[in-house]
Amino acid sequence: GKILANLFYEPSTRTSSSFTAAMERLGGSVIPINEVKYSSVSKGESLADTVRTLECYADVIVLRHPETGSAAIAAKAAKKPVINAGDGMHQHPTQALLDSMTLLDTFGTLEKRRIAFIGDVLHSRVFRSGYTLFRMLGAEIGVCAPPLLRSGHLPLDMVELSDARAALKWADAVVVLRLQRERMQSGLVPSLADYRQRWAVRIADVEENSCYVLHPGPVNAGVELDAAVVDHARSLIRRQVTNGVFVRVAVLVEALGIPVVQPSSVVT
């Protein structure tokens, strides 16, 4: 069977486990490398060297790295396929794919649908990948974030929303983004209490509107949303996790060139 190397320079539960489950469903196996700081990298090995070594063992490499552009560097160095599982604050393409699948399952099409991102847009690779793909699929995009947590170069075609309540009224679906405190400098958010007051998604507001709620995880319940929102009828959060495996199976099938057998027609 095929072998996948999960090369994660940043902590991950969902994405790493999802790729592992996807590879095992395809009959392959996984080399898990989730503590890179304790490996040869801490001895001075470059990303390119690490990737070239791993491709001697594996047929495909899944990479998460804290630096923007790292996936492109790895792909250039490697002869085997490299899948971007998140490069710094830049991109997270498989998250955008699974979010799009979840929304398409719900709405049938994203044409003219309104999708709002709420929270830490500045540090979010989920926002950058999601915005690009949702717009390609015809959606209108809104953004709702504290002034210091907005990207300095927001696209001009985005609708700016004043707070979480306004976003839930405007949108067909909202993507709630966690505060990435590990990437922040001090002072971007005065306090969590102040943040919740204006930017948290509250269960009462969810119940008052027909808007669906997504979250890429991990969820900081009680910060960017109420805990009760996660399993509410309007929440798509659990479905996102399930769809993540299906999407990553498809990505691996494409990357590895695995033949797809179409089911034969049944004649009765």
Image (cartoon, rainbow, N blue to C red):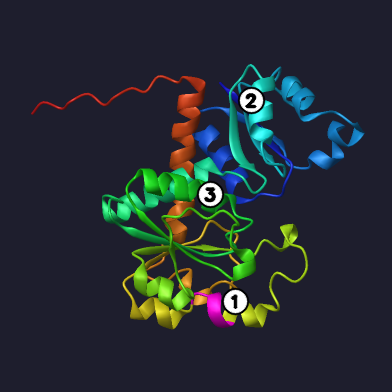
Q: Which of the image's four quarters has the C terminus?
A: top left
The quadrant holding residue 205 is bottom left
Q: From the viewer's perspective, is 187 left or right of 129?
A: right
The residue depicted at 36 percent of the width and 66 percent of the height is 171
Please say if 213 is above or below 228.
above
Please say if 263 is above or below 211.
above
**Position of residue 232 measured from the top left corner of the image (x, y, whole percent):** 41, 72
Circle nearer the viewer, 1 or 3? 3
The quadrant holding residue 165 is bottom left
Q: Residue 128 carries which label?
A: 3
The residue depicted at 47 percent of the width and 49 percent of the height is 130
Mark 1 and mark 3 lie on one chain; the one further toward the N terminus is 3
The residue labelled by disc 1 is 222
**Amino acid, disc 3:** Arg
Please say if 227 is above or below 72.
below
Residue range highlighted in magenta: 197-201
The answer to whether one can see residue 219 in this image is yes
Mark 2 and mark 1 lie on one chain; the one further toward the N terminus is 2
The quadrant holding residue 2 is top right
The residue labelled by disc 2 is 75
